[in-house]
Structures are given as structure tokens and as C-alpha cells.
Image (tube, coloured by chain):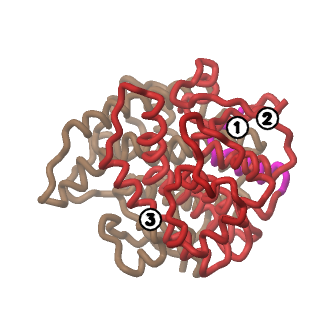
Chain colours: A red, B brown
Amino acid sequence: MNILYYHPLCAKSRFARVMLGETNIPFHGKIEEFWNLRDNLIKLNPAQELPILVYEQNSIIGILPIIEFLSDLQDKSYFYGASLIEKAETRRLVDWCIGKFYHEVLAHIVSQKLLIFYDNSKYTDSNLLRHAKNNAKFHLKYFNYLIKTRGFLSGDKITVADFGVASLISILDYLNDINWIEYRELKIWYSILKSRPSFKPLLDDVIAGFIPSSQYKELDF
Amino acid sequence: MNILYYHPLCAKSRFARVMLGETNIPFHGKIEEFWNLRDNLIKLNPAQELPILVYEQNSIIGILPIIEFLSDLQDKSYFYGASLIEKAETRRLVDWCIGKFYHEVLAHIVSQKLLIFYDNSKYTDSNLLRHAKNNAKFHLKYFNYLIKTRGFLSGDKITVADFGVASLISILDYLNDINWIEYRELKIWYSILKSRPSFKPLLDDVIAGFIPSSQYKELDF
């Protein structure tokens, strides 16, 4: 059986779970504490990061290789778009999502709000948290602008860029860190993304110690 | 004419120049100070980063989209390898190179050694610089280990992972920040990469205020 090593708090793992849900590849999910990877997982990925997909005994390591692999494997042309120019725009936004948005927003919020909850020896750096929340506004405005202009993030059709941004946003939504009134188009778009069957497993996530926001599981919110 | 917006100090731009050199796509290079992008370039790339390739009036933005685009455009199967599993391994290492190696080493060394030279108002953070140099040792050892085991970084054939790591390493070599005696296999491998015609433009780079190390331009060093 194919295995996805993931964690509900890991934004990139969420992205991988949605992408697998968009294919019909059977897999078994194994939760792994990414701040404390076991020896055999470090052997799989010396970068000590999730997600890791073991597909027919082969390790596909990291979110980007996993998406490209799934796209090639099942010839999912809608994942990146049809033309080379569309692909380049989708890849730019995937890079924005798991590079820029992840590092400037998600990584800080997860570490400062959630990981610290599990590690009593550390204190929240409230400056860093405030900084990440300010950054979030800039990113959300940009996503909202793109959707308003184009329909979806990278054009008029859904692509992996949409799945990526929605997966990452789901953590912010869980924590009630988005003032949805400010982002009208993003809210409608997120409602569409949330409604896809591939998104269902994320909405069923419960993170110990954190009750999800009231709208988290609602498709119309 | 196709245009590549780049800068000799930008590690990802170096990678793009080598990759373009490996194709036969004609292009005109335009040097852009990435710490001070002009208004029309910010319009091209709101992430305000180099490299940007304008190919037949289309903007291909960011190093990853550029490599994948060039690979698809000319069906350069050696860029990522033949099988889906080989591709995944190459992509893992490209991600390591422009994600991990770049952020943990190159970005700090370039900002602390070079950019500060052009900005009199700032001082070098010697702790950060020392930290980056320590990180460099870990990465170089890992690359050396992979090459010793496999021949090239992602397997027994050259791929974009090799072009990427060599492009980034070229900045460290310029600044004489590699003690080559410690990395026997990496040194031989770098000599092979350096000898490719696509690498020549990088070896001709001169960075104002910084004399290259004595071995920088030597193919056998």
C-alpha cells in the first residue's frame, strides 16, 4: 500500500493530502510528528521534512516533487494548465504559496501558536506572531486580487495553485486568523475549494488543544 | 529578442543563465539590481525577485518555472532524468538547492558580505555570517557524499540538480569560502561542471569591489 507520512499541522502535508484526493491513487496516511521525526524517516528524507509519499516502494520526497509526480503519473493536465505559459504561471504561484506565503506567514503562525503549546519550555514570540499576521494580510489581499481578476488564482480554471493556497489557508481558518469580511472574492473561492471531496479529510481534522473556528467545517460560511 | 533579467550576485540568476546556456535559446541578458528593482520589473514580478525570463513576450518568473519551462520547451530529458522516480529525486535536490542551501547559506553570505559593501548604512552581522559558513559545511559534505555514492548529485547522469548546486557554489568559490581540500569528490565534480560551455559566462563575471579567488576561473584547480 502507498503511504503518505503527514501531520495535520503541517501546511505542506495538507497540500499533499488534497492533491492525492484529486487523483484516484489509494494511500494510507501515517501521522508523523514533524518536530520529532523517527530515525527511519530521517533516512527517507535527510531534510527532515514532511510530506513524504512512498509510492510502490519508491520515496517521493517533498511537496513539489509529489505534486509534479502525481501530475505526470495520471496525466492530470488541469493540475498545471495546458500550455507551457499557463504551466509557468501556475508554478510561479505554487512557488509563491509554498515558498513565500509559507515562510512569511504559515511557518511562524504554526510555530508560535501551535508548536509552543506542545513544548512548555518555550515562550511565544509575540513580535514574530504579529509580524506574521501582518504579512498574512498582504498575501490574502494579493490572492483576493488575483481571483477577482481571473476567476481562479492562475487563470480561469482551477489548478494546483488553488489547491495549495486553499490547503495553507485552511490552517489560518481553523485558528480563526482570517477576517473573511475583508476578502469577498477569496471567501467565495475558498467555499468552492472547501466543497471538493478532496478537501473533506482536512475539514475532519481535529488538532488536540485547539477547537476549530465556528466556520471551519462549514461549506457555506 | 528573449530577455533574461539577472544579476551576477543573485544565485538563482546564475542557475538560470547556466540552464539557458544548456539550451540553444538565444537571449539577451539585462543586469538588474535585485535590491532595487525598477517599477516595470515589479509589475512583471510582484515577488520582486530575479530571475525573470521574457520569452517571446511571455514572462516566465522565478527559477523553478524557468527550469521546468526550458525542460518542456526543448524536451531536454536529461534535465530531470527519464523516469518519474528519477524526476522526483532530481526535483528533491533542486528544492534542496534553491530552498534549503540557498536560505541557510547563500542568502546570508550574499547579504552579509556583498550587499553590505554597497550599503554603507549597514554593518555585517558576524554571528549570522559565521552561522551561514557553518551551515555551508553541512551542505557541502552532503553534496560530496551524494557525488561519491552516485557519480552525480541525483544519480549516475548529470541533471539540473548538478547545474543548480554548481551555480550556487560558484559564488562561494568566487569569495574563496570553500576549503576544497575537505571535499575531494565535490572538487572533481565541480571541475567537470565548470568545464561546460554553459558555465563560461559565470566564470567571466567580475563583481565590483571583490577580486575573485585565485582558482575561480581555473577549470583544473
Q: Secondary structure at mark 2?
A: strand
The answer for how far apart the CA atoms under marks 1 and 2 are is 7 Å
Instruction: Determine which residue is flagged by label 3.
Output: A137
Residues at marks 2 and 3, common chain?
Answer: yes
Q: Amino acid at mark 1?
A: Ile
**Whether residue B48 can be seen here:** yes
- Is B152 situated above or below B103? above
Chain ID at mark 3: A
| Mark 3 surroundings within 10 Å by alpha-carbon count, few (fewer than 14), some (14 through 19), many (20 or more) | some
Which amino acid is tagged 3?
Lys
Residue topped by disc 2:
A55
- Chain-order first, disc 1 or disc 2: 2
Callout 1: chain:
A
Give the residue at mark 1.
A60
In the foreground, A43 or A179: A179
A72 or A149: nearer the viewer = A149
Residue B161 at x, y percent in the picture: 57, 44
